[in-house]
Amino acid sequence: MENNEKLMKIRHSMAHVMAEAVLEMFPTAQIAIGPAIENGFYYDFELPRSLTEEDLEEITRRMKNIILAKKEFKRSVVSREEAKEMFKDQKYKLELLEAIPETEEVSVYNQGAFTDLCRGPHVESTKELNAEAFKLLSVAGAYWRGNEKNQMLQRIYGTAWTNGKELREYLEHLKDIEKRDHRKLGKELDLFSLHEEAGPGLVYWHPRGARIRQEIEDFWRKEHYKNGYEMVYTPHVGKSWLWETSGHLGFYKESMYPKMEMDSADYYVKPMNCPFHIMIYKNSKKSYRDLPCRWAELGTVYRYEKAGALHGLMRVRGFTQDDAHLIVTPDQMDDEIMEVLRFSLYMLKSFGFNEIHAYISTKPEKSVGDVEKWNAATEALKRAVEKEGLEYDIDEGGGAFYGPKIDLKIKDAIGREWQLSTVQFDFNLPERFNLTFVDKDGSEKQPYMIHRALLGSIERFFGVLIEHYAGAFPPWLSPEQVAIIPVAEVANEYASEIEKKLRGEGIRVKSDLSNDRMNAKIRKAQQMKIPYMLVLGEKEMANKTVSVRYRNGKQNFGLSYDDFVSEIKGVIERKEQI
């Protein structure tokens, strides 16, 4: 913790050093914000021209000179009038100053001649910064305050560490991240595309990506039926009454697409599936004998994310939510939470995620629902994670206003943490929609409602899978599981025969009957990260065998067809990686 705090101070201070260097180069620059972030820092600038690689080199040189000058970081509390005078030529600072509540003090930090409006904290002096342990990484566009209606600024990203060794290790890590970037691999492996001209943040699934998606969804549905869920399908649009009743128009309107007016009524495309599931529940009177209701849907929703926040598959505007809602009696709550958690862990592990950490978010200061319900629900979440032996952290007061939740975060192959599963209580919607059930004593009572997503959105989950496996999916998920490579044209007929038989076994297979040389065919299959290559020549034809070349470079010559089918089917069934 102490080391993290030290690094955050170093990075925050490095952002100020960078701003000073940029102002030296561009005296008329308008400076915006410059925080420390995970693994680094950034600062946003309005500049007279676009920055180049050469500019980053010059900014770096100037930053090193500032660091070596051993400047002190001095904090001062100033009046609002003094601050306005200090930043009279900096419009973004004046806007930030206006946003500081009257009850809060205004503080500035100086290092030499450079002054910034800032809460801190910072290092004591640039002596604590290592001139050989930072690097400016990139320049990106960023709208002021994340609003695309505002001025586009230039954001310089950098990273900073305590020593050169840490920096070198991090830069190697960045290379690995770059190789795994789902946007890059999505294009190389022909999995999906995004088309700004047709609508930003909307995903086009190509045939190869669609095969993987279908495999994920088929597995998802099969496991849900095994775990006692029923599938539902709901509309993509609903009248404004639905969203007013649910509270979305009051609390969530900025993230919803604009209304459509039809037949003298206002409609909205859905940002969430929950109100629709509630309408199904309310379609008939429910008894305690009907509960628990476990309804699941791969429901496509639309949320108006800001353009600057969109990022490949990870942040989109239209996505399919791996959604389910459980409506339960109070005495069913513990068992249902336990089963949901077990199911979540099983699903995540099936996709190769074995490092899982839980986070429990508790009651915030402003909330709905009575305290007893909150406490009972929170304790049920704790009991479930403890019973499963999961390590967990408590985020005190971090719950949504309508209920406590568990988030499950996984670590991928290179140690990055991703939040996937969520189990969320909701004390708001049952109240708003007046949900009831008839209990054993004949009285009407309000049930508990649990929102639950195991994978999150299919799009984001697919992006995480791509990066986790670097595109080399385990055979059960691979779009093509087998590439058949005839050595020469004479083996084409045998290749087609093997392909037909494998297709009959349910194996995803394709023969390369092109005129390319064998090595070129193998290279093409390797580039597409196909797990099995069957190389067929005259010897294999004569013996009615196959020679297997695996994605990892291993080979197995002269295998009988039946033995190969048995091997690949076993690997697929066990969801193993090769």
Image (spheres, helix red, strand yellow):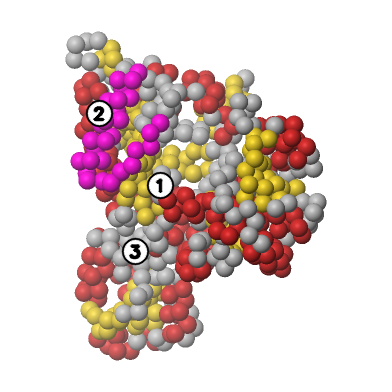
Residue 508 x %, y %: 36, 65
First of labels 1, 2 by sequence position: 2
The residue singled out by tag 3 in the image is 474
Residue drawn at point x = 34 percent, y = 64 percent: 474
Residue 572 x %, y %: 28, 62
Residue 127 x %, y %: 58, 60
Please give the range of residues in magenta.
370-397
Residue drawn at point x = 62 percent, y = 20 percent: 264
Residue drawn at point x = 25 percent, y = 31 percent: 380
Q: Nearer the viewer, mark 1 or mark 3?
A: 1
Tell me if residue 185 can be seen.
no
Left or right position of 221 against 479: left
Q: Is residue 396 magenta?
A: yes
Q: Are marks 1 and 3 in contact (CB under 8 Å)?
A: no
The residue singled out by tag 2 in the image is 333
Q: Is residue 374 above or below residue 396?
A: above
Mark 1 vs mark 2, CA separation in Å: 24 Å
Q: Residues within 10 Å of mark 2 (few under 14, many from 20)?
A: many
